[in-house]
Amino acid sequence: MANHLRFVGRTVMVQNGNVEAAYGVLNRILTQDGVAEAVRRSRYFEQPCRARRRRAFEASRRVYCAEMARRIAFLARSSRQDPWLGC
């Protein structure tokens, strides 16, 4: 089990006995992976209609964020010509 990729990715080393910093790093890793929110969500029963609404909202948010990132990357590209040459 120790060689499992997800286990190794969530392993935090404590340096110089600084447990607080290691705990903060572990919390950040678990938050980014979505483990903390999954545990929080599974604490109570979620009605199927609300689960569908939540999943649909998360999917639409992913699409929106991806589209906005694509637009920002398009505007921030380095090979872009200056639209107002004479100004």
Image: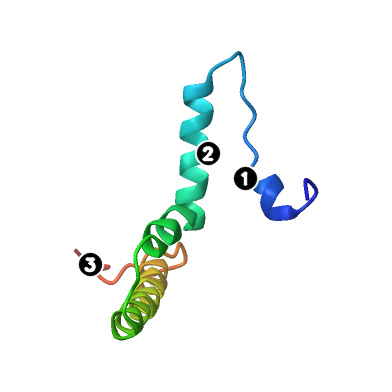
Tag 2 residue: 26
Tag 3 residue: 86
If you read the primary sequence from the N terminus, does the residue marked by circle 1 or circle 3 appear first?
Answer: 1
- Which of 77/72 is in front? 72
Circle 2: element type: helix
* Residue in the picture at 52% in, 39% down: 26
* Residue in the picture at 44% in, 57% down: 39
* Total residue callouts: 3
Circle 3: element type: loop
* Residue in the picture at 50% in, 48% down: 30
| Residue farthest along the left direction in this orientation | 87
User: Crowding near pointer 2: few (<14 within 10 Å), some, many (20+)?
Assistant: some
Please report contact status of discs 2 and 1: CB closer than 8 Å, yes or no: yes
Give the amino acid type for the residue marked by disc 2 in the picture: Leu
Left or right of 36: which side holds 29?
A: right
Looking at the rendered image, the disc whose residue lies closer to the viewer, 2 or 3, is 2
In terms of image quadrants, where is residue 80?
A: bottom left
Tag 1 residue: 10
Measure the C-alpha gap from mark 1 to mark 3: 55 Å
Residue 85 in the image: state x and y as whole percent: 27, 68
Residue 6 in the image: state x and y as whole percent: 67, 54
User: Crowding near pointer 3: few (<14 within 10 Å), some, many (20+)?
Assistant: few
Give the amino acid type for the residue marked by disc 1 in the picture: Arg
Residue 73 in the image: state x and y as whole percent: 42, 67
